[in-house]
Image (tube, rainbow, N blue to C red):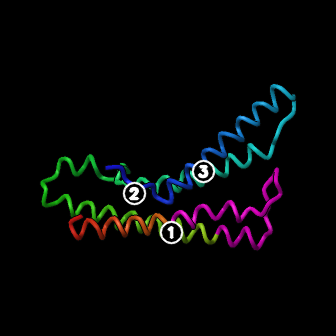
Amino acid sequence: MKKSMLIEERIIAVLLCIMVLMVFAQILSRYIFHTSLSHTEELVRYFFVWVTFFGISAAVARKKHPSVAIATSFLPEKFVKWTRIASGVCAVLFAAVILFTGVRVVLLQVRTHQTTAALGMPMWIMGLAIPVCALVLITRVILSGYKLWNGR
């Protein structure tokens, strides 16, 4: 049975398609038209950050993250559940630190009116990737822990 796509996977798919098209346009512009589209390089770099952070959340939701799989393979079955729960708690704490720090960085970017180099767009828009995806990650880890706790 095929699982439906997560919202993170849909966002990743769209961003990856856009990234491929922008890199292709950049290659064409350099080698055929002998000019550079500097804004595409910048956007691809920022989209890569979004894809990476959403990928972490999607991996947690699909239970494909590395976590403690190796460690739990050597443990007796009665300890596996608690090890996964402890791993989830650590992941939530780590994501909370990233969320807190990401919010502080975004607020600093807003306060100092930072803009991107090539596009001149507000840097906080790109900086939102960190707190937004950390919040999504926290949600996914908590949902995963809830399902584990209830035996699903």
Range covered by the magenta-colored residues: 105-134
Discs 3/2, front: 3
Mark 2 or 1 closer to N-term?
Answer: 2
Foreground mark, 1 or 3, reads: 3
Chain-order first, disc 1 or disc 3 = 3
User: Amino acid under label 1?
Assistant: Leu
Horizontal arrangement in the rendering, residue 44 relative to residue 50 (left or right): right
Q: CA distance from mark 3 to mark 2?
A: 20 Å
> In x, y percent, where is residue 106?
67, 68
Density class for disc 2 (Cα within 10 Å; few <14, some 14-19, many ≥20) is many
Q: How many C-alpha atoms fall within 10 Å of the one at disc 1: few (<14), some, or many (≥20)?
A: some
Residue drawn at x 19%, y 58% is 80
Quarter of the rendering containing residue 120: bottom right
Q: Position of residue 103 (x, y in %)?
A: 61, 71
| Residue at image point 41% right, 53% down | 59
What residue sits right under mark 1 in the picture? 135
Label 1 vs label 3: CA separation? 20 Å
Q: Is residue 86 left or right of residue 38?
A: left
Type of amino acid at the residue the image marks with label 3: Val
Magenta-drawn stretch contains 84: no
Q: Is residue 25 left or right of residue 19?
A: right
Which circle marks residue 60 in the picture?
2
**In the picture, residue 130 is in which quadrant?**
bottom right
Q: Which mark is residue 14?
A: 3
Instruction: State the image coordinates of residue 134 (x, y, percent, origin top left).
Output: 51, 65
Q: Name the residue at 84% across, 36% down.
A: 36
